[in-house]
Amino acid sequence: MNHLSALKLFNHPENYLQWYRQGYTSNPITVKIDLTNVCNHRCPHCIDASLRGKESLNIDRLNVLLDELAAMGTKGVHYTGGGEPLLYSHFEEAVAIARNYGIEVGLLTNGSLLNRVRVANCSWVRVSLDAYDEKSYQKTHGKGADWETTIEGIKDAARCVRTTVSYLTADGEGVEAFLEIAAGLGVQGAQVSPYTNIRHKITHKMCERWERQYPFARIHREKFSLQEQKGICQSHWFKATNVCATGKVYICCQLAGQKRALIGDIYRERFRDIWTSTRHREVAQALKIEKCPRGCVGATTNQLLRGIKGISDKGTL
Ligand code: SF4
């Protein structure tokens, strides 16, 4: 098992040690924030399709939230969906506020509105390209999605900020073509991962071949080999929490919109109170992660932490 991405946890020894001793952390290392539920694309496999709507976070409440997160020691926020973050009317301000509080900003975007000016203050940008030409782009992003504009935006962004492109696959179709295109974009990385909500047919041999052919690419081989998870999720204490554009807070971005994962609402409570609440612990304890998507955002971290602590399938909090 390749724990490369999960190992980043050890860059934050104080959080890790607290979890090791007490079974929880006093603050999240990173938080995912949906700036808006509005989106200009219609991707058939979007995991946030059920969240789609007109809501956007109030910029004043976002300012207070970022202040709270900075005080709690949070290192980074990811501006992501809900919808497309670059459609948020205060996007640049949202980045500037976070940076002023000393919080790093990562942007996850469909790339359609990308340019170097808009993302100049971001720490990194990841574009969900999921395509290798106009036809495949319209298949994965919906009719009307403009391939050329997105490609030009990616090239422009990559000149000033670390930019990567990603490709989700269930059967390997188009991976080589995607990596060929990625190689010519001037981006700092390209990654291939499985859809979390579709069973895939990718084999170890296929991953090896792509790694050999395209050494610059990051093939998430560990995610392709994940089995169904059991027990209690541990990784959500570090990085999966999602503040949605409605203000609702979910224990994990992959369960956003699901009642079983709801832990609070920032329009009613302070984030710190939500984070330290009994409800947060109870939701975490009751979560049946057998129902979580394979290859989810926390799967490799869960596997690593279980291995370290020798946690049984019953888990602990
Ligand atoms: S197991 Fe995965 S999907 Fe489930 S709560 Fe943890 S990180 Fe989220």
Image (tube, grey):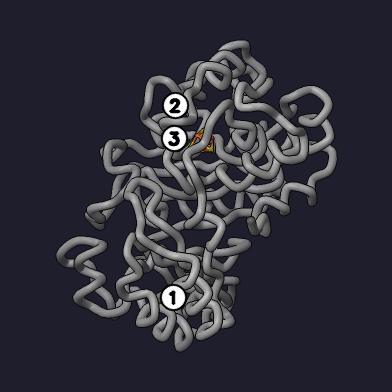
Percent position of residue 96, x then y: 60, 53
Q: Distance between the residues labelled 2 and 3?
A: 20 Å
Q: State whether residue 288 is above or below residue 282.
A: below
Q: In which quarter of the image is residue 63?
A: top right
Please state if 268 lies on the left or on the right of 103 as rendered.
left
Outermost residue, bottom side: 184
Q: Mark 2 points at which residue?
A: 248
Q: Which mark is residue 292?
A: 3
Residue depth check, mark 2 versus mark 3: number of the one nearer the observer: 3
Which amino acid lies under the numbered mark 1 shown in the image of this protein?
Ile
Q: Which residue is drawn at 41% across and 31% down?
A: 291
Q: Residues within 10 Å of mark 2 (few under 14, many from 20)?
A: some
- Quarter that holds the N terminus: bottom right
Q: How many labels does the image show?
A: 3
Q: Which mark is residue 154?
A: 1
Q: State whether residue 282 is above or below residue 158.
A: above
Disc 1 is placed on an element classified as: helix
- Disc 3 residue: CB within 8 Å of ligand 1: yes
Which amino acid lies under the numbered mark 2 shown in the image of this protein?
Lys
Decide which of tag 2 and tag 1 comes sooner along the chain.
1
Residue depth check, mark 3 versus mark 1: number of the one nearer the observer: 3
* Res. 152 visible in picture: no
Disc 2 is placed on an element classified as: strand
Please state if 51 lies on the left or on the right of 222 as rendered.
left
Outermost residue, left side: 143
